[in-house]
Every structure is written in C-alpha cells, then in structure tokens.
C-alpha cells in the first residue's frame, strides 16, 4: 500500500468544498492553505492539515519534500481532440492571409483533411502519435484529460479512434475520459444533397451510437452545433438518442455565431456547453439557471486571431459555472500547455487567479462528471496532485508559456516528473 506525506509546500491550492461545480462567490475561493501537509493513502488523499497533527498517523509514510513550492489538485482538461494524425500547420498562414475557418473547410482543409488522414492510419499508428501527445499534455500538470473522437466520421473510424483512447487509458497513469464526437462535421461523402445529411445523422444514431455503447467506448456524446455544421434540430436528435442510450451529453455551442446552442445545452441538461465565444444574452441566462458547465477555450480564439473571447465575466457574474480547457486539436488550438490557458483566463477573460484554478480543477471535473472524485485536495478525493515550481499561486499564470509543473501524481502514483534528480526529493534551487 502506498503511503505518502507531501511536506514543506509554500501553499496548497485545495479547491476544497462541495463535490459539484462552483458558481458565484464559491467560484472565487480556491481555498488556498499555507503550512499544511498532505497525506496519501493508496490512491486516496487521507488527510490535509498541519504536519505535526497528521504525521502522528502517517509517521511511516514516504516523505516528499516539496521544497517550498506550490501544490494544487492535478488539473482537469475537460476538452481535447487528441486523437488525430498529421498536424495542420499549413492553415495558420492561410488564416493570417485572410481565409476564414469555414473557407478553409470549403477548400478541403480543416476537419476534412484530418478525417482523410485519420482514415488512412492504423490503430497502432494513431496510438503511438496520441501517446506522445497525451504525455506532453500531462507534463504541464493535467492529471485528468477528456479526449474526443471526431476525425473518423464513419462507423469503423470512430470506433478505431475510441479504441485508441481505451488503450491509452490502460497504458498511461493519467486519467482519460472518452467522448464520442461522431457529430464533429458532416463527412464529404454525405454532402451531395440535403437527404444525404439526414442519412449521416441516421447513421450516427442507428449504427455508430449502438456500437459505441456496446463496446463501452465512451462516457459522453458531443455534437458540433454551429451554423453550417449541425443544426439545433440535428443536435437535439443525436443528443437525446445518446442520453437514452446511457451516455452523458456535451455540446460545442455558439463558437462563431450565436445560434441557440447554449440554450439547447441547458434545456437538455448537458454536462457542459463548450466554446461560447458568440453566446447571446439569453444563452448566458440559460446557462446561469442550469446545471450545465460553461467551458471556455480562450486558446482557440487566440490561435485563430479572433478579437472576440467568450464573455467570461458576464457568465461568472451572472452565476454560471465556468470551466477552462485547452481544446487541444490540430486545427484551431494545437497547444498542450494548460497553464497557458490559465494565463489567458486572467489576462483575456479577466478572471481572478482563484477563478481560473476552480475552472481548471473542480469545474473541469464537473464538466466530465467526476466532481465527487477529482479536482480537490481533500480527504476522500483521488490522490491526483501537481507540484509547481513557484512559491506563490499567482506565479503559475504569471510565467506565461513556461512549464512550471515539476511533478504530478494520479491515484497516488507518480505520473509525470520533470526534475533532474531521480529520487522523490523536490528540494528547490536557492
Ligand atoms: Zn472542440
């Protein structure tokens, strides 16, 4: 049995509190403690408190000296598209030259080029590519990562993508949450006429969804609900069928144009509505009055060169629960750096440091249905921890772009370690 005692931290960002998404005043308090140690018993946090109190029960535990650094819950990245083949670096210059997202898609770029590429690759090939990418995501402090399919868009290629996520889950210590995003785009072979579109929606509902559920390959279903992609009616039918089949539901909503996606997410009781850069006033009110988490992805708008970011302050001040995530994907957000997204949360979305930590831990956990197990440094929670090379929590979003995470643990087991020393001692350089 693992027994660990994390000692000598300057601050512990506990995010401790109710096992659900935080909103309002609760979202502004990350419950940061000084002069506390953390005891881990097997895969669970056993105690958080003054060292002299908890070491009586954990005197025999292996000590990890944090050297005056900051400890936080392992970060929860609740929105990634990490299963893809080749990178799409050529589109960045096209966008800079004035071509829009939809125009690049119409020229056969965008998602369609990722689909054509993924369909040609073997499961082993995709596994090797994704393995390195997930390890990079984890090296920045994420211990729970949601991963979507969505570049297959056929029965076999969606199942292939989801099987890769299952294999990654078995082989990596990081916790992965699989989401089926068969409704990422209408594939080219179903674009001949309006009947063909309907045929694709029926294929998703009648053939792909049952196979995903039979194989126990996903916890959530997601739909890209946006003008030019899936309509509100199509989104509703796919998500209602998915919910009936036992999956949780998520939406890509109101990313580029206000479209009623946030309102639909709230109405359907989706676990999250993601993007929201173009959310309407009615959408903000609907999310604030619902249990749906508003997941904001500021890296995407930054990378696309957009002026507009999601109205985080209006959502927070209106009482919505806000999460942040990387949206790691080959087209619009090729970053593995979740702390950089926290920087954008403060500097672009005007969130406080406490709000960005709640958004990247407890509320991210709520956005993947795990708020009762991960996202807090509190007794009974999974021992998912990140140690940061910083003596003050505010340094983490401040040193923007830097990799300050020097170690993570998932279920009490070492997941990532960036230190030079090969023992557990994390003593800090003067
Ligand atoms: Zn996405």
Image (cartoon, rainbow, N blue to C red):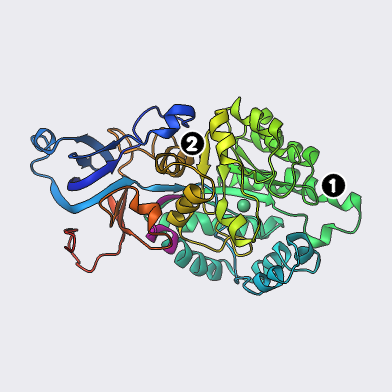
Q: Position of residue 215 (x, y in %)?
A: 58, 47
- Residue of label 1: 198
Residue 43 can be seen in this image: no
Magenta part of the chain: 136-145
User: Is 91 displayed left or right of 392 in the figure?
Assistant: right
Reading the image, the residue beneath label 2 is 366
Which structural element holds mark 1?
Answer: helix
**Horizontal relation, residue 214 to residue 34: left or right:** right
Give the quarter of the image for residue 303.
bottom right
Name the element at disc 2.
helix
Give the position of the N terminus as an image quadrant.
top left
- Above or below, 390 against 221 in this view is below
Q: What residue is rendered at 68% in x and 48% in y?
A: 255
Residue at x-position 72% and y-position 57%: 154
Magenta stretch: residue 58 in it?
no
Q: Position of residue 321 (x, y in %)?
A: 53, 33
């Amino acid at each position: 049995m693992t027994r660990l005692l994390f000692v000598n931290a300057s601050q512990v960002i506990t995010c401790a509190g109710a096992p659900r998404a935080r909103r309002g005043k609760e979202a502004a308090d990350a419950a940061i403690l000084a002069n506390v140690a953390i005891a881990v018993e097997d895969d669970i946090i056993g105690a958080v408190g003054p060292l002299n109190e908890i070491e009586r029960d954990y005197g025999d535990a292996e000590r990890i000296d944090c050297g005056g650094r900051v400890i936080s819950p392992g970060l929860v990245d609740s929105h990634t598209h990490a299963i893809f083949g080749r990178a799409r670096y050529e589109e960045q210059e096209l966008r800079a030259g004035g071509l829009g997202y939809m125009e690049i898609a119409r020229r056969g770029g965008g998602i369609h080029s990722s689909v054509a590429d993924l369909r040609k690759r073997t499961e082993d090939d995709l596994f090797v590519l994704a393995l390195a990418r997930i390890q990079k995501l984890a090296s920045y402090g994420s211990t729970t990562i949601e991963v979507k399919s969505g570049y297959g868009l056929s029965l076999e290629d969606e199942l292939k993508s989801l099987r890769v996520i299952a294999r990654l889950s078995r082989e990596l210590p990081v916790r992965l949450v699989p989401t089926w995003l068969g409704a990422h785009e209408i594939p080219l072979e179903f674009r001949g006429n309006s009947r063909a579109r309907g045929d694709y929606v029926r294929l998703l509902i009648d053939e792909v969804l049952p196979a995903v559920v039979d194989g126990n390959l996903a916890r959530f279903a997601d739909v890209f609900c946006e003008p030019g992609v899936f309509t509100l009616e199509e989104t509703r039918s796919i998500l209602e069928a998915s919910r009936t089949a036992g999956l949780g539901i998520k939406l890509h909503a109101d990313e580029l144009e206000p479209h009623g996606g946030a309102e639909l997410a709230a109405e359907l009781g989706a676990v999250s509505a993601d993007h929201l850069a173009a959310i309407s006033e009615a959408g903000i009110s609907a999310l604030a009055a619902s249990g749906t988490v508003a997941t904001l992805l500021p890296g995407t708008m930054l990378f696309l060169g957009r002026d507009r970011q999601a109205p985080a302050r209006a959502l927070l001040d209106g009482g919505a629960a806000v999460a942040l995530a990387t949206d790691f994907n080959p087209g619009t957000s090729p970053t593995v750096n979740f702390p950089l997204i926290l920087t954008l949360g403060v500097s672009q979305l005007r969130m406080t440091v406490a709000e960005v930590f709640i958004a990247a831990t407890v509320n991210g956990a709520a956005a993947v249905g795990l708020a009762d197990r991960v996202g807090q440094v509190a007794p009974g929670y999974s021992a998912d921890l990140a140690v940061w090379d910083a003596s003050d929590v505010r340094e983490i979003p401040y040193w923007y772009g830097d990799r300050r995470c020097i170690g993570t643990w998932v279920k009490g087991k070492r997941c990532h370690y960036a230190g030079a020393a090969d023992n557990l001692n994390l003593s800090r350089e003067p």
